């Protein structure tokens, strides 16, 4: 569909990929609903979109995606303002990356599952009856390479994103007869606030090579492209695709390489102490 004049909800729109995605829809002339907890940042993004001069309309909604009542309010406010919902971008999420035994059971484990997975499920559940009634819509779920390949210190984040993958795949086959498309985006490393909030500690300095790092705008452009031309999955950048296939078909090799080159060097002191 052409995003112009379409009603789009973008969750996690106060920064990073969500903010960039909202801007891209604004440039396309959409009616964009910005949802996140940080209202001041949402209002700044809204002002920037309105200044594009594309005819885009913007509505700001304070929402904590771990709370069902906030999600219900988000959908109700969107319908009260615009009367329909054409595109849902489930982007809100965060990571806490550490060895599993170091993660706090509530702040790190339960919170990640609540926002990254349950937030996606519950938001989609609230929007779906609207799209079914309209006989059309697009749901775009921000997954991650962690939703296809699990790596050390990503246990809970990967679990949440694997959950989004399974949810999206099943939902796509469930709602297509209603004219609703479900797409998944799988970015690798992206230059956002993610790393600064994730608590990453690396002795090996292992990180995504610079030539494979994406900008938030690149991912946002891909999301708008999926609204125009839906497809089931989009791995960004495509250079990660061979790694996904290796993880599926030669899992033992990925295990060996990851354990010997990352896990053991990172945990060397602990292993020696035991």
Image: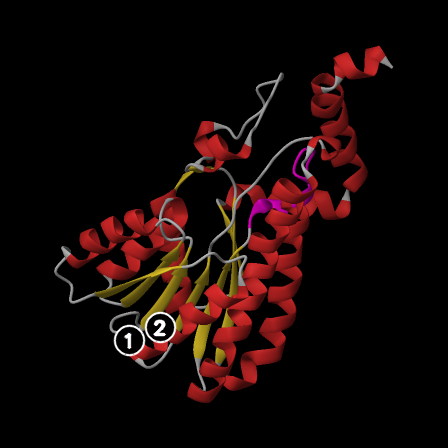
Number of callouts: 2
Q: Is residue 274 above or below residue 107?
A: above
Q: Does the magenta-highlighted stretch encompass residue 22?
A: no
Tell me if label 1 and label 2 are in contact, CB under 8 Å. Answer: yes
Closest to the observer, 269 or 251: 269
Q: Position of residue 201 (x, y in %)?
A: 59, 23
Locate residue 63: give its quadrant: bottom left
Q: Does the magenta-highlighted stretch encompass residue 147?
A: yes
Distance (Cα) linking label 1 and label 2: 6 Å
- SS label for mark 1: helix
Q: Position of residue 10 (x, y in %)?
A: 39, 60
Task: Report crowding for label 2: few under 14, some 14 to 19, many 20 or more residues within 10 A (C-alpha).
Answer: some
Q: Quadrant of the C terminus?
A: top right
Magenta part of the chain: 144-156
Q: Position of residue 22 (x, y in %)?
A: 32, 56
Residue 77 numbered tag? 2
Residue 81 numbered tag? 1
Task: Report crowding for label 1: few under 14, some 14 to 19, many 20 or more residues within 10 A (C-alpha).
Answer: some
């Amino acid at each position: 569909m052409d995003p112009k004049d379409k009603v789009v909800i973008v969750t996690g729109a106060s920064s990073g990929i969500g903010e960039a995605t909202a801007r891209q829809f604004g440039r396309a002339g959409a009616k964009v609903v910005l949802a996140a907890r940080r209202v001041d940042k949402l209002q700044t993004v809204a002002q920037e979109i309105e200044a594009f001069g594309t005819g885009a309309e913007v509505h700001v909604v304070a929402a904590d995606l771990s709370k069902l009542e906030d999600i219900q309010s988000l959908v109700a406010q969107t319908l009260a303002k615009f009367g329909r919902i054409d595109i849902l971008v489930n982007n809100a999420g965060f990571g806490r990356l550490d060895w599993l035994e170091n993660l706090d059971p509530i702040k790190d484990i339960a919170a990640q599952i609540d926002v990254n997975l349950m937030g996606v499920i519950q938001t989609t559940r609230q929007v779906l009856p609207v799209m079914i009634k309209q006989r059309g819509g697009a749901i775009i779920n921000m997954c991650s390479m962690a939703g296809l390949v699990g790596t050390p210190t990503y246990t809970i984040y990967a679990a949440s994103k694997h959950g989004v993958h399974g949810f999206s795949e099943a939902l796509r086959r469930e709602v297509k007869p209603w004219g609703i498309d479900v797409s998944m985006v799988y970015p690798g490393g992206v230059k956002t606030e993610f790393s600064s909030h994730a608590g990453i500690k690396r002795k090996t300095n292992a990180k995504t090579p610079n030539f494979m790092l994406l900008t938030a705008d690149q991912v946002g452009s891909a999301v708008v492209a999926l609204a125009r031309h839906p497809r089931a999955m989009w791995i960004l950048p495509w250079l990660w695709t061979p790694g996904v296939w290796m993880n599926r078909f030669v899992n033992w090799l990925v295990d060996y390489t990851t354990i010997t080159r990352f896990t053991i060097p990172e945990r060397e002191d602990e292993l020696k102490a035991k």
